[in-house]
Amino acid sequence: MPEKNKIVFQHFNFYYGTVMALKDVNLGIRPRQIFSILGPSRSGKTTLLKSTNRLTDLIFGMNHTGHIFIDDQEVYDSQMSLPELRRRVGMVFDLPTPLPLSIFENVAYGPRINGINQRQRLEEIVEKALRLAVLWEEVKDKLSSSALRLSGGQQQRLCIARVLALEPEVIMLDEPCSGLDPVSTASIEESLTKLKERYTIILVPHNIQQASRVADRVGFLLGGELVEEGPAYQIFTRPEDKRTEDYISGKFG
């Protein structure tokens, strides 16, 4: 029997004022997989991510219809705690944004805010998060050094560790490798492949090739519409919609 979906979009529409950014999205995202969202610029990819943990609430004039469920809980329910939602559904952006603190304090920052101050417990959390982000071996001897001294790829993995320290259930990444060199990109992809053993991951990739390397399932957005979704091998080898085929083959985008 197939495992129940972790996240479900039902007839979800999203508007910036009068501009419709997402159109009747119906989608199920399975647990412990990497779901990759493809599409050209302004197709709604980032809006889909930000809607999932309601970062879109920060935008004036936004509106939506339809539903998003996480484990059968309505994301837009009036009783939903936004801090708890954003802990459960963490987000990593395209540009790494380490705090001007030490490597240790960057990862410990979220747990401290949540009331964890015991040094031993913080050390356990930091080490676990850095190991999961495949960064521990590179930084374990310089945890007191400034995070700003890390390379771009290391800073991005540190940002992933910072999310992991809050023990999320879902990790969303919006082009996390857009400014990184191939070696750093490979490190991030290695991290994601290991993280999916524990977490549900939604990835907007830097390019189609990245999605083909790491994704289990793929969805193609165009003009806010989910054109199709399915197993990665199917989307890349025999998509059902001509628009998907044209995008995958580089005819537009």
Image (spheres, rainbow, N blue to C red):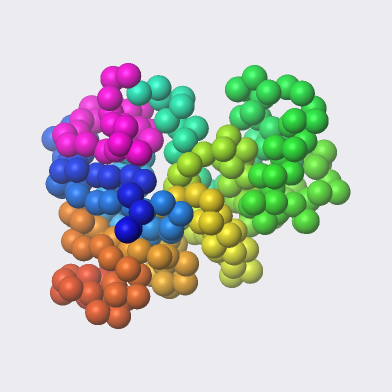
Quick one: quadrant of the N terminus?
bottom left
* Left or right, residue 131 beside residue 239: right
Where residue 130 sits in the image (x, y, percent)? 69, 48
Task: State the image quarter where residue 179 is shown.
Answer: bottom right
Q: Can residue 207 be seen in this view?
A: no
Magenta range? 53-79
Where residue 108 sits in the image (x, y, percent)? 69, 32
Q: Work out which residue is located at the far right of the displayed protein and give it.
A: 141
As drawn, 136 above or below 249: above
Residue placed at 51% from the left, 56% from the top?
Answer: 196
Between residue 48 and residue 247, name the one nearer to us: 48
As drawn, 108 above or below 248: above
Between residue 102 and residue 163, name the one nearer to us: 163
As drawn, 69 above or below 206: above
Residue placed at 32% from the left, 19% from the top?
Answer: 79
Quick one: quadrant of the C terminus?
bottom left
Q: Work out which residue is located at the far front of the displayed protein and give it.
A: 1
Task: State the image quarter where residue 89 is shown.
Answer: top left
* Left or right, residue 215 beside residue 252: right
Residue placed at 48% from the left, 46% from the top?
Answer: 171
Is-magenta flag for residue 98? Answer: no
Where residue 49 sits in the image (x, y, percent)? 36, 45
Task: State the image quarter where residue 194 is shown.
Answer: bottom right
Residue placed at 60% from the left, 22% from the top?
Answer: 114
Total marks in image: 0
Between residue 121 and residue 59, name the one nearer to us: 121
Q: Can residue 128 be seen in this view?
A: yes
Where residue 112 sits in the image (x, y, percent)? 67, 24
Between residue 31 and residue 68, name the one nearer to us: 31
Is-magenta flag for residue 66? Answer: yes
